[in-house]
């Protein structure tokens, strides 16, 4: 069975993605390259995924993530000192979060295998879980605990978890699962699907933290005396030194693996439980 979208479907998706990418660029959520990547991914996801949850899960992720980031940046500006990148998202960040979903919908169109619609939703559930955990976790009263050594670390650090961050991850995954089940024409056993997409997203975000604690490249600012993901320069302007992790394992790669695991896990769970 071919699920290739019609030309009009693609054109409507392209126009919608163009408007949203432009607005996100004007509002400072996306850089120029980020807006271009979002245009391509948005066209794929909303065009091919039109009847399979694409528009709702993509917009649910994008809008909730952008609003939460803005709020956190305003109320907790110090959280921007740790993250590898702050400010407008570039193309790599967009691809790391949405690339697996775009690829899943492409595979859906070419193979006609409906499991790829679930994979796309699973990957965005993981991306959203991770985003909510980071942004809402910044407001946690308790400091997060490092998965590497169990010590309390600064809010917003990769590889650390707090109760509020974990609850936010579950909430972020649940939103995407809900939007998928509500808008996709392929939802065998809606309650199980809701559960398995939420679980896949949550576990994907947890993997993100585990990778953040182990393999992700971390730097040290000798002037501020603090760990950071920023390289080559810290927000203070001084050069940072590599302190641990694999040097190529940037936050973008960790996010990509997070979304990939959300997709793979949702396929696995769908195979086992649906
Ligand atoms: Zn510094």
Image (cartoon, grey):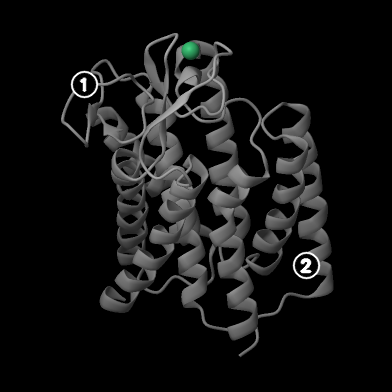
Q: Is residue 176 visible?
A: no
Towards the viewer: 83 or 168: 83
Q: x and y percent of residue 270 in the render?
A: 34, 73
Q: Is mark 1 within 8 Å of ligand 1?
A: no
> Residue 259 falls in which quadrant of the image?
bottom left
Q: Is residue 82 visible?
A: yes
Q: x and y percent of residue 177 in the render?
A: 42, 55
Where is 181 relative to 66, above or below? Answer: below
At x 31% / y 36%, what residue is drawn?
A: 159
Q: Secondary structure at mark 2?
A: helix
Judged left or right of residue 176, residue 144 is left
For marks 2 and 1, give the one nearer the viewer: 1
Q: Secondary structure at mark 1?
A: loop
Q: Residues within 10 Å of mark 1 (few under 14, many from 20)?
A: some
The image quadrant where one finds the C terminus is: bottom left
Towards the viewer: 22 or 158: 158
Read off the residue under disc 1: 152
Read off the residue under disc 2: 9
At x 77% / y 47%, what residue is drawn?
A: 36
> Residue 136 falls in which quadrant of the image?
top left
Badge 2 vs badge 1, beta-carbon distance below 8 Å: no
At x 62% / y 25%, what residue is drawn?
A: 87
């Amino acid at each position: 069975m071919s699920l290739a979208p019609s030309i009009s479907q693609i054109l409507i998706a392209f126009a919608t993605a163009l408007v949203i990418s432009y607005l996100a660029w004007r509002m400072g959520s996306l850089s120029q390259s980020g807006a271009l990547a979002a245009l391509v991914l948005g066209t794929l996801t909303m065009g091919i995924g039109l009847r399979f949850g694409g528009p709702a899960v993509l917009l649910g992720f994008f809008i909730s993530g952008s609003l939460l980031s803005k709020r956190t940046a305003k109320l907790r500006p110090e959280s921007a000192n740790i993250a590898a990148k702050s400010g407008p998202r570039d193309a790599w960040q967009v691809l790391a979060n949405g690339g697996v979903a775009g690829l899943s919908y492409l595979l859906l169109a070419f193979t006609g295998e409906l499991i790829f619609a679930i994979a796309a939703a699973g990957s965005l559930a993981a991306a959203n879980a991770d985003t909510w955990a980071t942004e809402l976790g910044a407001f946690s009263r308790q400091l997060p605990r490092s998965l590497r050594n169990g010590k309390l670390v600064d809010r917003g650090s990769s590889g650390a978890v707090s109760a509020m961050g974990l609850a936010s991850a579950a909430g972020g995954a649940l939103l995407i699962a809900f939007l998928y089940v509500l808008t996709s024409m392929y939802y065998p056993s809606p309650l199980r699907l809701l559960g398995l997409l939420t679980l896949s997203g949550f576990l994907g975000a947890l993997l993100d933290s585990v990778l953040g604690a182990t393999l992700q490249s971390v730097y040290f600012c000798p002037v501020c005396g603090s760990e950071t993901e920023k390289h080559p320069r810290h927000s203070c302007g001084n050069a940072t030194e590599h302190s641990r992790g694999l040097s190529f394992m940037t936050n973008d790669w960790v996010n990509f693996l997070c979304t990939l695991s959300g997709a793979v896990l949702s396929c696995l769970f769908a195979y086992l439980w649906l």
